[in-house]
Image (tube, rainbow, N blue to C red):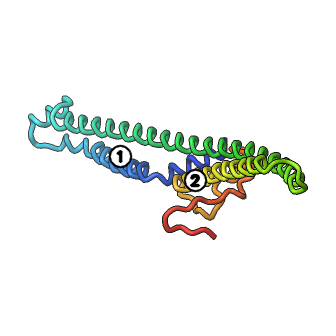
Amino acid sequence: MECLEILTQQAIDQSSEIEAINAQLELTNDRQDYAQNRQWTNYLTLDPVRLLQNVLGGGDVQRGGLAIASLELDEADLIRRRENEAQDIADDVVGLVLSYEKLGREYELLDSRLRTHLLQVQIIEAKYRTGQGSTQRMLTLWQRTDDLKARCDEKRIGQAQERRELEILTGADPGMQIYPALVGGCGHGDTSTIPRATFGNETTD
């Protein structure tokens, strides 16, 4: 999905680990270029024995070749590390988005049940005020109302926390809607009423 690709790329661009690997790769490439560019200087010697060794692929030429091969192995290892790190980041993004969607679907189901329950409570409460029904039944219904509201709030708070995790992972401004695509391509339901999680010294508007 396009939104997952965008979020994953934002998270990869934000990763300090990948930034460090890229810096190491750049340094390794520079060292490779330097080693390759100076290979020809191994033939600039007045020592006939050394020159013969180099011509035959030994001596300084051999050592230079081994150094280049070692740098190439280092480069391959760094590339593998970068790919693994990027995959871990992608897995984190997908996990957060899937959890966000799951919480959204659970909220919608609970919200629907709460609305139906509130309609029933309204009817029964009206009868109760006219002397019909028992206090115990009303207490049970009111407790059920509180329970459903609490569960709805729990799902909304969970979504806010997942959104905050995505904001941290992608480096997005908390004041921005960083994934509007969750409403359609990646997710379900309206996200406009989901509160933004705050931690530490953060404040909400």
Residue 46 rendering spot, x and y as whole percentages: 10, 43
For disc 2, the neighbor class at 10 Å (few under 14, some 14 to 19, many from 20) is some
Residue drawn at (14%, 36%) of the image:
51
**Res. 60 image quadrant:** top left
Dot 1: what SS? helix
Q: Where is 98 relative to 195, above or below?
A: above
Q: Amino acid at mark 1?
A: Asn
Label 2: element kind:
helix
Instruction: Between label 2 and label 1, give the one nearer the viewer.
Output: 2
Asked if the residue at tag 1 contacts the one at tag 2, i.e. Cβ–Cβ closer than 8 Å, the answer is: no
Residue 54 is situated, as x and y percent measured from the top left of the image, at 18, 34
Q: Which residue is farthest top? A: 56
Q: Earlier in the sequence, mark 2 or mark 1?
A: 1
Q: Nearer the viewer, residue 182 or 139?
A: 139
Mark linked to residue 161: 2
In this figure, which residue is indicated by the disc labeled 1?
Answer: 29
**Residue at the (71%, 42%) spot, across then down:** 105
The reply to whether residue 191 is visible in this rendering is: yes
Distance from label 2 to label 1 (Cα)? Answer: 41 Å
Q: Give percent across and percent down for residue 98.
A: 62, 41
**Apparent side of residue 124 relative to residue 192 in the rendered image (left or right):** right
Quadrant for the N terminus in the image: top right
Residue 184 in view in this figure: no
* Residue 193 appears left or right of 31: right
Residue 62 image-quadrant placement: top left
75 vs 21, nearest the viewer: 21
Closer-to-camera residue (123/115): 123
Comparing 147 with 11, the one in front is 147
Q: Amino acid at mark 2?
A: Gln
Residue 55: percent from left, percent from top: 19, 32
Q: Is residue 25 left or right of residue 56?
A: right
- Kindly identify the residue that appears in the image at 63 percent across and 46 percent down: 100
